[in-house]
């Protein structure tokens, strides 16, 4: 499918003006935004944010206009929110939660249990199996308890499976055993019975073996009556190595067959320094295909972009998001807008 050129008639300070895209993607009507279209079809669309970004009025205006959902970039990471054994730091994440509540935006929580972003007191400590279980239990209860009723969905266990389909050797697997996954979900459900609970992992090119293992894990948890509601999929990719949209659809359908939801928990598409029309079209096409794979599935109702503007990308030269560093919408923005409007 060839992506037609996108024509924009919008300034960053007026995100609700008329937007249009070429015939390859359809036409977007005046006044439509990602948020308005997503709200109209009961779909969650949003971005990852940092608390410090919310100090900027232009950023907040654009965020509120375009997103009905946000998730913290790092503020809920274990090492940030739990810096010492008996100490929690909720302040940064509270800033994001307060913004969400104040602007009628849903909040999605992430990475309660992960092998990365762990504090030194944990990674360099010497803990028995029972002590590690207690640490994990207390962390889940404390974090989810603090945000009970504010977060609609959590990534409970993150990236536990490698590309070969085998479980990663992590502090949790090595110290507790494979039961840590089921325990984490059970504790999470006890901490907030109303929150949706997800296993989350990253997907890219040729991920069949990995996500077959993810599906087997999810099916096994269901057979054990473990309270899991869905699978989160991260699509961190680039125009140089585009994923196969049919493979993604197959994965989503495989999860749907288990009766579970799918959330696209993170998507970013690097353009590796190129900013020409052809490069931006390639980026837009990947976004369009991923969004369509989600929208056409019965069980996929959430899509989170890795960030709002390229200004706040960890590597701005990769320009992976929907708005450029000045807040101007890119072809990728119009591609998603068009997809949501169909």
Image (cartoon, rainbow, N blue to C red):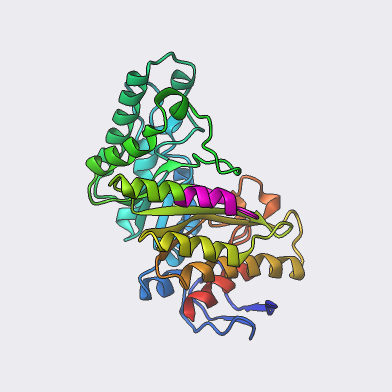
Is residue 19 found left or right of 3 in the rendered image?
A: left
Residue drawn at x 57%, y 84% as measured from the top left = 26
Is residue 270 found left or right of 61 in the rendered image?
A: right
Q: Nearer the viewer, residue 184 or 237?
A: 184
Image height of 143 relative to 342, above or below? above
Q: Nearer the viewer, residue 212 or 327?
A: 212
Whole-percent x and y of residue 196? Answer: 31, 52
Report whether residue 56 is seen: no
Report whether residue 10 is seen: yes
The N terminus - image quarter: bottom right
Q: How many marks?
A: 0
Is residue 305 found left or right of 178 in the rendered image?
A: right
Whole-percent x and y of residue 223? Answer: 32, 48
Residue 239, quarter of picture: bottom right
Residue stretch in magenta: 201-215
Q: Nearer the viewer, residue 323 or 47?
A: 47
Whole-percent x and y of residue 280? Answer: 70, 67
**Residue 204 lies within the magenta run:** yes
Q: Nearer the viewer, residue 128 or 54?
A: 128
Residue 44, quarter of picture: bottom left
Whole-percent x and y of residue 210? Answer: 56, 48
Residue drawn at x 62%, y 59% as measured from the top left = 326
Judged from this view, the residue extending furthest toward the top is 126
């Amino acid at each position: 499918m060839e992506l037609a050129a996108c024509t924009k008639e919008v300034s960053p300070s007026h995100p609700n003006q008329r937007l249009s895209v070429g015939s390859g993607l359809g036409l977007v009507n005046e006044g439509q935004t990602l948020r308005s279209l997503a709200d109209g079809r009961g779909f969650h669309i949003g971005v990852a944010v940092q608390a410090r970004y919310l100090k900027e009025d232009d950023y907040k205006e654009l965020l509120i206009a375009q997103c009905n959902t946000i998730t913290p970039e790092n503020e809920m990471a274990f090492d940030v929110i739990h810096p010492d054994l008996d100490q929690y730091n909720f302040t940064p994440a509270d800033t994001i939660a307060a913004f969400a509540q104040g602007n009628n935006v849903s909040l999605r929580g992430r990475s309660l249990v992960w092998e990365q972003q762990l504090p030194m007191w944990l990674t360099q400590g010497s803990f028995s199996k029972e002590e590690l279980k207690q640490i994990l239990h207390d962390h889940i209860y404390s974090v989810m308890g603090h945000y009970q009723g504010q977060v609609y969905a959590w990534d409970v266990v993150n990236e536990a499976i490698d590309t070969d389909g085998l479980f990663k050797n992590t502090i949790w697997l090595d110290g507790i055993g494979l039961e840590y996954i089921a325990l984490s979900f059970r504790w999470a459900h006890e901490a907030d019975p109303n929150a949706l609970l997800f296993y989350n992992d990253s997907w890219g090119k040729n991920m069949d073996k990995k996500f077959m293992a993810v599906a087997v894990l999810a099916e096994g948890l269901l057979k054990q009556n473990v309270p899991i509601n869905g699978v989160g999929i991260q699509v961190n990719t680039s125009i140089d190595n585009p994923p196969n949209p049919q493979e993604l659809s197959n994965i989503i359908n495989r999860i749907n067959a288990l009766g579970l939801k799918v959330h696209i928990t993170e998507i970013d598409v690097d353009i590796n320094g190129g900013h020409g029309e052809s490069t931006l079209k390639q980026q837009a096409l990947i976004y369009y295909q991923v969004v369509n794979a989600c929208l056409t599935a019965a069980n996929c109702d959430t899509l989170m972009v890795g960030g709002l503007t390229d200004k706040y990308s960890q590597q701005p030269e990769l320009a992976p998001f929907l708005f450029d560093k000045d807040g101007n919408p890119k072809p990728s923005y119009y591609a998603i807008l068009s997809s949501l409007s169909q």
